[in-house]
Amino acid sequence: MYAQTLEQTSNRQYAPLLSGNNVRAEALRGPQPFPDPQDMRPSLQAPQTRAAGLMVFDHKGRLVAADARAELIMAALGVESNCGSRLRIDALDVSATRTLPWDLPDWLNPDWIEPVMEGSERLGTVVQIPAQRSTSTTQGGVPAYKLRQVLQFIDAHLDQPINLTQLAAVASLSPFHFHREFKRSTGLTPGKFILEARIKRAETLLRDSDLPLAQVAIQVGFADQSHFTVAFRKVTSMTPRTYRNATTKGRRAQIDSAAA
């Protein structure tokens, strides 16, 4: 779970955030609809649409409470608590100890955020997750920020063996779930995506360098030149040597044309 429910939260430092006078915190007590706007505090406005899930963060950006709907949505988005500790969003830290600006995490839309004020003092932040979110979220797939981390990992390790378990760990998903969601996000299985990334880098090396074919094979993660040749031909319908010769001749023709 991301945080305690309001009934379980007893720490006095969160009382102003979780008091019955705070309509956002009150909404976290259960699935009942929001109070009538006329009964709300003047400093807070009624939301235009009812949130599907609500989360309350204190002034240091630490998650204080979340309703069951928010926890389900967070799980679907792939957002997890930090190894069992309380979830914290640095960008929501408005305390005096904060010295540097932070960007919001990719999953958190700025439109979902509402400060909780008491006079001129900001007590914390309420996150109202709408029932209808972005298409990428509702259709599934690896969350955007995790997908970027996976792609960066692949790019940094193309000269090495890469397996499904490694990629799933980067995305904090089970191998089975990651395989399915990665294909939803990219249209390719992880294995197919990695192969095409290796071949694309090989094309660059063949075209722009004079490295021996055996060295190119090693730099793009193949055990030897033979395996590299088979895979390259399967993807491009030509051997690495044929590709190099064709692209080299084309580049030389361009140079000669420019010189003339």
Image: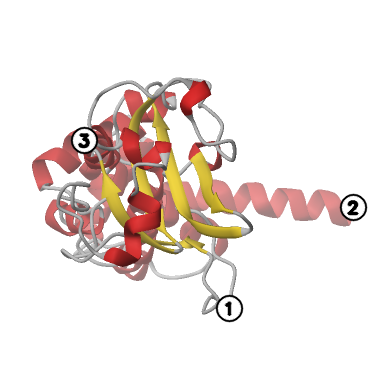
Q: Which residue is mark 3?
A: 72
Mark 1 neighbour class, 10 Å CA radius: few under 14, some 14 to 19, many 20 or more: few
> What amino acid is found at the position of numbered circle 1 in the picture?
Thr
Question: What residue sits 20% from the left and 66% below the top?
Answer: 85
Relative to the observer, which residue lies in front, 153 or 129? 129
Q: Position of residue 1 (x, y in %)?
A: 15, 50
Circles 3 and 1, Cβ within 8 Å, touching? The answer is no
205 versus 243 height, above or below: below
160 versus 124 height, above or below: below
Mark 2 neighbour class, 10 Å CA radius: few under 14, some 14 to 19, many 20 or more: few
Task: Identify the element where label 2 is drawn.
Answer: loop
Question: What residue sits 31% from the left and 63% below the top?
Answer: 217
Q: Earlier in the sequence, mark 2 or mark 3?
A: 3
Looking at the image, is mark 1 or mark 2 nearer the viewer? 1
> What amino acid is found at the position of numbered circle 2 in the picture?
Ala
Mark 3 neighbour class, 10 Å CA radius: few under 14, some 14 to 19, many 20 or more: few
Q: Which residue is mark 1?
A: 99
Alpha-carbon distance for marks 3 and 1?
33 Å
Q: Which residue is mark 2?
A: 260
> What amino acid is found at the position of numbered circle 3 in the picture?
Leu
170 versus 237 height, above or below: below
Q: Residue 179's mark?
A: none
Q: Is residue 31 left or right of residue 150?
A: left
Relative to the observer, which residue lies in front, 131 or 255? 131
Residue 197 visible in this rendered orientation of the protein = no
Residue 112 visible in this rendered orientation of the protein = yes
Question: What residue sits 27% from the left and 49% below the top?
Answer: 65
Q: Earlier in the sequence, mark 3 or mark 1?
A: 3
Question: What residue sits 39% from the left and 59% below the top?
Answer: 152
Circles 2 and 3, Cβ within 8 Å, touching? The answer is no
Circles 1 and 2, Cβ within 8 Å, touching? The answer is no
Q: Position of residue 191 (x, y in %)?
A: 21, 44
